[in-house]
Image (cartoon, rainbow, N blue to C red):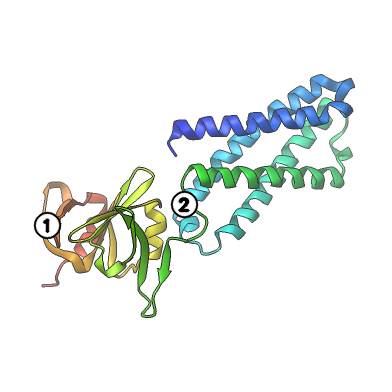
Amino acid sequence: MTPRRFLIFNISFWLVAAIVLFINSLPSSKTHLDVAYTRYIYMMIVAMLISAVLTLIYKSSWFQGSTRKLLWTALISVLAALLMAVILNPILYLMLGRELHEVHLEILITGTLYFTLLFLLWSALYFQWANQPVHRQPVTETGDHRRAFKVEKMGESRLLQDRDICCVIASGDYVELLTDSNSYLLKETLANIESQLDSERFKRIHRSTIVNADMIESVVRKAGGAFELTLQGGNTVQSSRSYKMAVESMLPKA
């Protein structure tokens, strides 16, 4: 998801949520409509800021590599909801001219519950729009502990063994799996694919490229600490100097 798409998604979701909650609260807010308006404007602003932080967590290598993404998503949503309740309810009480010590625990709990539902819904929609699955459906594991990816080409499905992959390249919302004679697009994130590959054989050499060390035929040093790697089948990929040590670890020892 591009920054522009995320901004549109984030604003749209919390604007709709604020409008729905405001309409739902009208029967009990008729005498304090100004407070209700302000409360849901604050809610929208705070929620968008918290959601921006959530995207950093969901994009992190820790979350991408986790085998319990659903559990962590639920826990993160609860913590985000609790933070929302702790921030918004005191603001509401102060606007009504009440003291902070008058904020009852039951109100915080109730607020946390419905904010949790909102953050869970937001997370589910975010994962869908960002093409960031919370499970590993495209991947199976064979008896010898190798990985196999379910791919499709020209309407034909097959299992692509990881040993046949020369490199993996990020391509927008997809990753491209290159073999010595073909290429396959898979709707996945590079970080998620990386977490499922054998780290001893598959090394990231660029922020958008992972190579299979067993498929490297030659390596040429370039200026500035970069390398050009030629893989089986004739494919060539460029490393960035940030991954110089990763490439050097794959070179034959003298």
Read off the residue under disc 1. Answer: 234
Q: In this orientation, which residue lies closer to the viewer: 186 or 193?
A: 186
- Badge 1: few (under 14), some or many (20 or more) residues near its Cα, within 10 Å? few
Mark closest to the chain's N terminus, 2 or 1: 2
Q: Is residue 69 above or below residue 105?
A: below
Q: Residue at x 64, y 36 (%)?
A: 47
Q: Please give left or right for residue 110 compared with residue 191 in the image.
A: right
Q: What residue type is labelled 2?
A: Ser
Residue at position x 15%, y 47% in the image: 224
Question: For the residue labelled by badge 1, is the local secondary structure a helix, a strand or a loop?
Answer: loop
Residue for badge 2: 60
User: Residue 215 is drawn in which quadrant?
Assistant: bottom left
| Residue 63 x %, y % | 50, 56
Asked if labels 1 and 2 touch by Cβ distance under 8 angstroms, the answer is no
Q: Point out residue 160 in the picture as x, y percentages from the top left corner.
A: 31, 65
- Could you tell whether 2 is left or right of 106 in the image? left
Please state the horizontal and vertical placement of residue 85, each as a whole percent of the image: 74, 41
Which label lies toward us, 2 or 1? 1
Q: Which of 10 and 32 is in front in this view?
A: 10
Tell me the quarter of the picture where residue 141 sits: bottom left
Q: Tag 2's secondary structure?
A: loop
Residue at x 26% of width, y 63% of height:
165
Along the viewing direction, whichever of 63 and 20 lies nearer the viewer:
20
What's the residue type where badge 1 is placed? Gly
In this picture, is 101 found above or below 155? above
State the quadrant of the C terminus. bottom left
Question: Quarter of the image containing the N terminus?
Answer: top left
Alpha carbon of mark 2 to alpha carbon of mark 1: how far? 33 Å
Task: Name which quarter of the figure residue 250 lies in.
Answer: bottom left
